[in-house]
Amino acid sequence: MVTAVKPDISFLIPAYNADDTLAECLASLQQQTRSNWQAVVVDDGSTDGTWELLEGIAKTDSRILPARQPNAGAAAARNHAARLAAAPLLCMLDADDWLDPTFIESMLPVAEDASPAVISYCAYRRVAPDGRLMQVEQPPTLTGDAAKREFSSFCALAIHTVVFPRSLFELLGGMDETLQTCEDWDLWLRMAFSGAEFRRVDRCLAFYRMKSGSLSGDPTKMMRDAILVTTKAQALQMQQGLSAEEPETGWITPAISQLRMLAWVVAAKLDPTLDIAALASLLPDMPDGAGYENLLAGVILHGLQTGLFIDRADDLIDVSDKWQPTFLLLIQLIQKHSFPGTGRKIIEAASWHISAANPLRSFALGNVQVVGVALETLSRIPKAEPADTLIMHALSGGQHVGSFVGPFWGDLSIRAQIRLIMHEMQAEEHLQTPPKLAYMSSWTKEALRGYRAFGGLIIRNGRRRGRLERILVRTGRNALLACAPSDKQDNDARLSDILRNLRRDPTRLLSDSSGPCPEEKNAAPPVQSEEEYWEHIFERPDPWNYVSVYEQVKYAQTLSLIPEGIEKALELACAEGIFTEKLARKVGRLTATDISQRAIDRAVERCHDHRNVELRVLDFVRQDLPPEQDLVVCSEVLYYMKDEEMLAAVCGKMAAALKPNGYLITAHAHIRRDEPTRTGFDWGNPFGVGTIKQVLAAQPGLALEDTIETELYAIHRFRKGSLADPVLRVERHGTPLDADVAKHIIWGPAGVEREAAWTTEVTTSVPILMYHRIADEGPAALRRFRTPPEVFRKQMQFLRRQGYYTLTAQALTDLLRSGKPVQGRPVMLTFDDAYLDFLTDAFPILAENDFSADVFVVTDKVGGQSDWDSAYGEPAPLMLWSDIQQLHQKGISFGSHLVSHTPATAMDNEALLAEAMLSRNALHSRLGTSVESIALPYGATDFRVPGILALAGYGVGFTTRQAKATFSDNLFGLPRLEVRGDCPLEAFPELMGLPGAFIG
């Protein structure tokens, strides 16, 4: 008899009618390289020879402890075995499974009976009834919260791949005996939420025997138990504050977890008599599967391979008649409760996975047709019905040379296949030249058609060789296509007919003629001198909008600092005399000067009724100032001194021009570069009021006497005389701010200058922010899609403060195509649906912050309402075409949001092509410029959509996939970061990758 001292690990083995497998199971333990183990085998009321077999084996090996109980189920048997176990570590092994000889040796050093407990787990292999070893099933990494997340959704570990402390098992109360299935899943879930640490052993050490007819057990029991476990998981999540249930986070709702289990059970059982709808009715809620298509496709394929004992996904093709009817019924059920196109995307994902295992296999699954072609033996391929999506893999010499994924219109003639290989896969070098006579004939015809190009090489100078090579390549391509067989039903011919018919129908498509492009403004001529610069500034009257509320309030505050009894005053940089006219009423005699003759001419006209005013041209930097002044006023001009030395010289001049006890009054803005820790303007001047104040205060004989301080500027009154106690008054600036003023303001504490970021930073990713409405009010159910204007203003001020600048769709596309890193901090702002509140609430805030944006228009709904939201409450009004045209003239870019706001995934190929073309042409006609961008309603896309959008003339498409755009992204699938209106303001810096940065 084999005996052992106190064991290091106890195996808990329930046995019910297991006389045909138990001996092999126990033999796998007896063959372990480490012998210090115990096996507690509980006969769970067997009616065959299990007990007799067990007794016989136990008599020869004292490490095997037999026990009996009336039939109570596997969970009860394992709990019974655990009470008899002697070791500190446990492993649950079913009587029909077995372990690798190195299982104990590999697993024991990893598991620990500690606090927190450490659990080890490994990979396993299923074994088909005929003894075939299936592929290794590698469990996920379960570090940190990953264990809680994974076990909340499904059973991530096979029962006999886990070694855990007995103390933890006892602390948690063992297995839940009310569960007839899923009891191991429930245990792992509770262990994860208890804080246990899961450590993976990267070896395949366990084997799971598959029996015909027993897979998935009783589907009803499995579904009921899975619902109980996932409901318990939700309660545990809520207790620990883990409720981030979004596809992007990995956490998924109990409803999706239950749908996942339903999909696996149906696929694995593969019983044509199974009532799928009745099984689905067990689910408390049938969820929307949108966003989880890849997950569901993988689960279904795994279930099918398990149920059919198939190791490779492409082997499913050979038995498609056995599983496709059930598969399509399951897809139909999921689609019934999901966003349009969800079922289509599950089929696409499944088809791609199957074809990836062997690209040369051809098959059809639902609306997808997969074609593998060997370039050495091209032949005509008929289109399967109801396929509208093509996955085509090309192989040359057995090597994969390219793939095409896109819309499918007709049969694949040899010519249609060659066109896809040349133009879509860029793999023409792998094509074989056809018989010489036919090919040479076609080549000659193509060359004659292109005789002008050849002739151009003869009469032109330049790099002829490169042009000749390109012409020869194009001629060869065209010749190859021309001599390849085709027919009127092939893919290309059918597509040509569809396009021709769409363009002929004037009720569906507007004219495709090129419209006028907006003229670019003439660039200003280069400036040769200071005088010329200022003359250019004053080409148009009032270049700084001095009649605005903001400027008029500043003027009134400045006038309030002028003492009574001023006889002789000098105003420097009077511009067009708007302030001069007001100042003249407060003083006896006024000399007003400016460097620009144009400005003085306008000032003379404005002040002609004021006989106490003398106006003249004066460059106060280079010329002397009139002396003996009671008052000098010099505002909004000292920024233009090139450095502090020049500033000090000018300040000295002004001080010298004053009489004793005379006054100097200046008003200047806070400039961000000068005072980086406070709100200020981002003008490129070297300094602002902070430095100007210091330099003036340093002038001998000048003393600061009075200050009016606002958030944006300060007005100072200095006196030429003895030092006095200065007075400080904090007042408000005038509002509303003109956009030309507001767009230069950086609000809040220190940030990053655009210019500094541009010169020191480069990036390979661009955040594209997605907004919908900018509004306070609306249906509660749509709160996520509605950002209040004041919150939006703080977000834009944050971007401005952090040095971001905006890109348009066209600029972004050009940058991504270039493949070169982008300078500075770019951001793209997008707004879906063209709501009226973009005009009334969003655009003014964008203008305030010097930002542009791209707005995506539902062209048939312009001037109407967002009726696609009518189920949630009162639809919101949309902009008129006149509004869109007005904003377009102001620099806002517009793209398509299709015609009807229908998800692209819900339309057939021809309908989607028609909508895409109609919408693009409507925008082109109204705006007079080419439109190349589109944002798909709801972000809905599939394998066909990019190809159809390209056919419609678009160059870039935006989705709702949550990520930054990078150079590796498909231009028709660019991701966007949704700015949710139901998130706190503090979430915005985190979205931009600047968590904790000041906002608000």
Image (tube, grey):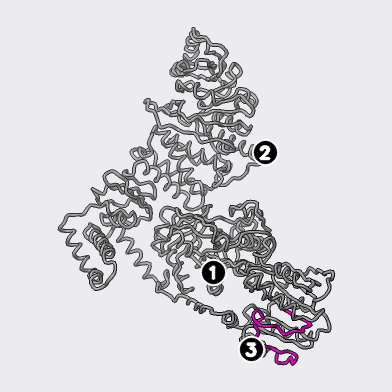
Q: Which mark is residue 239?
A: 2
Q: Give the number of the mark in front: 1 or 2.
A: 1
Q: Residue furthest top?
A: 1
Between 587 and 871, the one lying in front of the other is: 587
Q: Is residue 954 visible?
A: yes
Q: Which residue position is annotated with label 1?
A: 892
Which secondary structure, mark 2?
Answer: helix
Where is the C terminus found, in terms of image quarters?
Answer: bottom right
Q: Amino acid at mark 3?
A: Asp
Mark 2 burial class by Cα count in 10 Å: few <14, some 14-19, many 20+: few
Q: Give the number of the mark in front: 3 or 2.
A: 3
Report the Cα–Cα distance between label 3 and label 2: 77 Å
Vertical position of residue 433 compared to residue 694: above or below: above
Report the Cα–Cα distance between label 1 and label 2: 48 Å
Q: Amino acid at mark 2?
A: Gln
Circles 3 and 2: CB atoms closer than 8 Å:
no
**Which badge, 1 or 2, comes first in the chain's sequence?**
2
Q: Amino acid at mark 1?
A: Ile
Mark 3 burial class by Cα count in 10 Å: few <14, some 14-19, many 20+: some
Q: Which mark is residue 601?
A: 3
